[in-house]
Image (tube, rainbow, N blue to C red):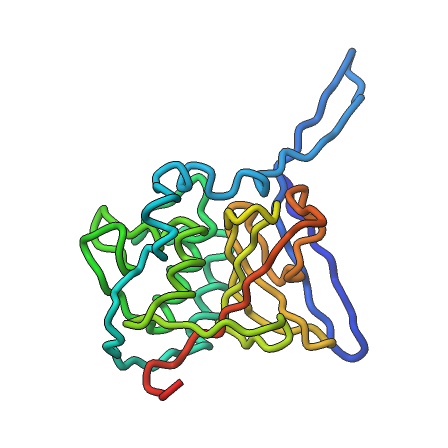
């Protein structure tokens, strides 16, 4: 495991982008002959995806309370960002650690910001973590993407058209292959000098990473993104 840091300056703004990489060195007769990246980006939420029946549960948006009952809450974006900064390269012992931990980490960030849990203990509904159980939407990228699109109760989000419209504490979902299976989730923690998001994430633990993930081995020209603005539950949005 190695840590890669890049100090980036854009006009008057300076930020440090950090990510951990797993690499394998190959030696022959005591000489280094190869060094390559073992990148988990391409297997994000692979285990989680196998837990869910995509044809029935997720195509029905997983959530999915048909009522529009509102749960009032204040979404504290800075608390979300503080949590993302505290735990981006570590694991909170209050929660289970997953091999593919990206969505679990983002759910923790949202919860730290005051997003309300609801739906326990039906794993196919709502968004929640309780004891040693959790909803699919808490830990599986594909499930959280559909939850955020369809939720009318508790944690709610509004899809926006571009990354520039996101704020700190908002969420980006990634479909690397463009095939309708959403594999990764990040949280916005800052903006660069061009007002584009910088994100924190788990699995390949990253801090202040440029939101497009074009430096990932999982990136393809067919990639699709979903941009979700988290709605403050005290507003009328």
**Which residue is depicted at the point 27% across and 51% down?**
124
Locate the C terminus by quadrant. bottom left
In this view, 106 is above or below 23: below
Looking at the image, the residue that sits furthest to the top is 29
Is 1 or 171 nearer to us in this picture?
Answer: 171
Q: Is residue 29 left or right of residue 170?
A: right
The total of numbered circles placed on residues is 0
Residue 68, quarter of the rendered image:
bottom left
Locate the N terminus by quadrant. top right
Q: Is residue 130 left or right of residue 227?
A: left
Is 215 or 37 nearer to us in this picture?
Answer: 215
Residue 198, percent across and down? 62, 66
**Which residue is depicted at the point 63% across and 69% down?**
197
Residue 129, quarter of the rendered image:
bottom left
Q: Is residue 195 left or right of residue 56?
A: right
Residue 213, percent across and down? 66, 54
Residue 2, percent across and down? 64, 41
Residue 188, percent across and down? 55, 68
Is 87 or 43 nearer to us in this picture?
Answer: 43
**Which residue is depicted at the point 46% across and 77% down?**
78
Looking at the image, the residue that sits furthest to the left is 121
């Amino acid at each position: 495991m190695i840590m890669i840091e890049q100090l980036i300056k854009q006009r008057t703004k300076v930020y440090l982008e950090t990510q951990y990489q797993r690499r394998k060195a190959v030696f022959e007769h005591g000489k280094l002959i190869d060094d390559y990246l073992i990148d988990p980006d391409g297997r994000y939420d692979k285990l989680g995806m196998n837990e869910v029946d995509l044809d029935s549960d997720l195509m029905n948006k997983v959530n999915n309370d048909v009522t529009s009952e509102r749960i009032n809450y204040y979404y504290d974006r800075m608390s979300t960002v503080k949590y993302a900064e505290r735990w981006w390269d570590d694991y909170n012992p209050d929660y289970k650690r997953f091999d593919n931990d990206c969505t679990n980490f983002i759910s923790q960030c949202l919860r730290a910001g005051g997003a309300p849990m609801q739906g326990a203990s039906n794993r196919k509904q709502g968004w929640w973590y309780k004891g040693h159980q959790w909803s699919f939407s808490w830990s599986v990228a594909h499930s959280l993407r559909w939850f955020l699109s369809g939720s009318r109760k508790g944690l709610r989000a509004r899809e926006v058209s571009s990354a520039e419209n996101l704020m700190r504490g908002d969420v980006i979902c990634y479909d690397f292959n463009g095939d309708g299976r959403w594999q990764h989730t990040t949280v916005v923690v800052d903006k660069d000098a061009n007002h584009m998001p910088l994100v924190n994430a788990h699995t390949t633990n990253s801090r202040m990473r440029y939101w497009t993930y074009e430096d990932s081995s999982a990136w393809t020209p067919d990639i699709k993104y979903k941009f979700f603005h988290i709605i403050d539950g005290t507003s009328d949005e």
